[in-house]
Amino acid sequence: MKLIMAIIKPFKLDDVREALTGLGVEGMTVTEVKGYGRQKGQTEIYRGAEYEIHFLPKVKIEVAVNDDQAERTIETISSAAGTGKIGDGKIFAVDLEKAMRIRTGETGNEAL
């Protein structure tokens, strides 16, 4: 099993959710986060004053999938979240040692 974590632009969340649903991914966790990468923030003007924003709003998506779905899941997130511009985000995949569905006690792939 793999845990796929993606940091994306907030306005791409619905596109990613729809694409993953079409792929057969049944659940995800979404967290509003702030951060920066190579773009190092941005400058905005508010009421005539210029402000430097170091941490930009992003969305973190976490999806647990079977090993055989991992690569397709990463590709799907990448294509749905990509704009071709700086700040599109990152995708991380880590091994998931154990999963358990609390309600039924199912473990492993059955719990996903």
Image (cartoon, helix red, strand yellow):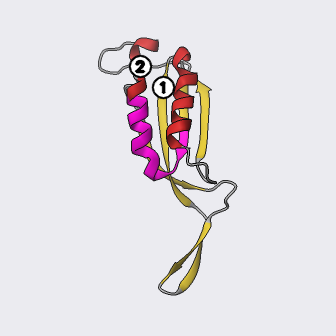
Q: Upstream in the sequence, badge 1 or badge 2?
A: 1
Residue 14 in the image: x percent, y percent? 39, 43
- Number of marks in the rendered image: 2
Q: Which mark is residue 21?
A: none
Residue identifier under label 1: 64
Q: How busy is the neighbourhood of tag 1: few (under 14 within 10 Å), some, or many (20 plus)?
A: many
5 vs 17, left or right, is: right
Which amino acid, by three-letter code, is at mark 2? Leu
Secondary structure under tag 2 reads loop
Label 1 sits on a secondary structure element that is: strand
Q: Position of residue 105 (x, y in %)?
A: 35, 14
As drawn, the residue found furthest toward the front would be 84
Residue 53 visible here: no
Closer to us: 98 or 54: 54
What is the x, y in percent for residue 57?
50, 57
Q: Write down the residue under mark 2.
A: 112
Is disc 1 in contact with disc 2, using a CB cutoff of under 8 Å?
yes
Q: Is residue 20 magenta?
A: yes
User: What kind of secondary structure does the magenta stretch mostly adopt?
Assistant: helix
Q: Residue 23 is drawn in which quadrant?
A: top left
Q: Residues within 10 Å of mark 2 (few under 14, many from 20)?
A: some
Stretch of the chain drawn in magenta? 6-21
Distance, label 1 to label 2, CA atoms, is: 7 Å
Q: Is residue 18 one of those drawn in magenta?
A: yes
Which x, y percent locates residue 50?
58, 81
- From the viewer's perspective, is residue 64 above or below residue 39? above
Q: Determine the residue positioned at 67% across, 59% down.
A: 39
- Residue 16 figure quarter: top left
